[in-house]
């Protein structure tokens, strides 16, 4: 057995272990819900026989919690797409509206970050470009956790906000637009010859360089004309890996969609 065969077998074994773990994580909540329903039935009968109003109120609160968890479990069963279980890349761009649009884009970033934290997902900010006066011009972040893409895929599109502008001294109503794209994290090396990579020193607000080493990575994937900038990590290698995934995934996903339509 060659060294390459050893690593290939190791990767296959690791993939099977991860697959088994995901299946267990999908089935285990059902067993837990079944046990909780049985327990609450016993507690209800005891509280009713003893006419304990405080215990009955506690049983009612537990039942509402079970209903919420059951709804979340049922929703997860619909996430059966090929890539629904994958991590997700979210890219938000401020649209027409100047400072208003940048502020709206920042509001969306905060909203999705809070949702991810409450849902138990990890967040990795890959790139952030501040607006000129306020807000953000462009943001790319990675949401890591099972079914992140399945939950977020429906958020793709243009988001609009109509409000009385806090930046307008005349208090006029403004319409702000921000585009949001979501792609799954799909492991694929692609064609290395079709990728142009340049490096630079990461910059802070005002344009000043904040590192002496060239850790920022600028990647251009030529077949799909996709450009990605990743400056988050202090390691150029890590920024290169993340930028590669973020650039290739939209193109790979488009090819997969075309293949599904053909079939």
Image (spheres, rainbow, N blue to C red):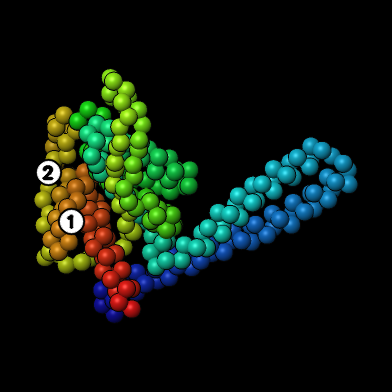
Residue drawn at the location 43% of the way across and 40% of the way down? 114
Circle nearer the N terminus (1, 2): 2
Q: CA distance from mark 1 to mark 2?
A: 19 Å
Name which residue lies at 48% across and 43% down.
Answer: 118
Question: Does dot 1 land on a helix, a strand or a loop?
Answer: strand
User: Would you say 261 lies left or right of 224 here?
Assistant: right
Q: Name the residue that disc number 1 marks.
A: 226
Comparing 157 with 54, the one in front is: 157
For the N terminus, the image quarter is bottom left
- Residue 227 relative to residue 119: left or right: left
Vertically, is 214 above or below 32? above
Callout 1–callout 2 Cβ contact below 8 Å? no
Q: Residue furthest top?
A: 169
Q: Is residue 134 left or right of residue 88?
A: left
Q: Is residue 109 visible?
A: no
Q: Position of residue 201 (x, y in %)?
A: 13, 40
As displayed, is residue 48 above or below residue 16? above
Q: What is the crowding at mark 1: few (fewer than 14 residues within 10 Å), some, or many (at least 20)?
A: some
């Amino acid at each position: 057995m060659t060294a390459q065969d050893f690593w290939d077998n190791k990767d296959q074994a690791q993939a099977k272990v991860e697959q088994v773990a995901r299946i267990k994580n999908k089935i285990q909540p059902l067993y837990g819900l079944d046990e909780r329903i049985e327990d609450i039935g016993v507690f209800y009968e005891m509280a009713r026989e003893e006419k304990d109003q405080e215990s009955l109120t506690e049983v009612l609160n537990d039942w509402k919690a079970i209903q919420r968890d059951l709804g979340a479990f049922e929703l997860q069963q619909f996430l059966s797409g090929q890539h629904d279980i994958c991590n997700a890349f979210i890219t938000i761009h401020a649209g027409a509206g100047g400072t208003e649009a940048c502020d709206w884009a920042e509001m969306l970033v905060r909203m999705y970050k809070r949702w991810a934290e409450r849902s138990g997902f990890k967040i990795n900010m890959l790139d952030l470009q501040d607006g000129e006066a306020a807000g953000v011009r462009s943001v790319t972040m990675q949401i890591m956790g099972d079914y992140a893409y399945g939950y977020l895929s429906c958020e793709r599109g243009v988001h609009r906000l109509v409000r009385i502008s806090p930046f307008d001294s005349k208090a006029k109503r403004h319409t702000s637009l921000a585009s949001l794209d979501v792609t799954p994290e799909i492991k694929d090396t692609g064609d290395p010859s079709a990728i142009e990579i340049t490096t630079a020193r990461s910059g802070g607000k005002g344009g000043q360089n904040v590192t002496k080493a060239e850790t920022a990575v600028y990647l251009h994937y030529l077949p799909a004309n996709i450009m990605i900038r990743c400056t988050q990590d202090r390691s150029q290698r890590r920024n290169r890996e993340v930028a590669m995934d973020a650039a290739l995934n939209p193109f790979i996903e488009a090819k997969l969609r075309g293949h599904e339509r053909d079939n």
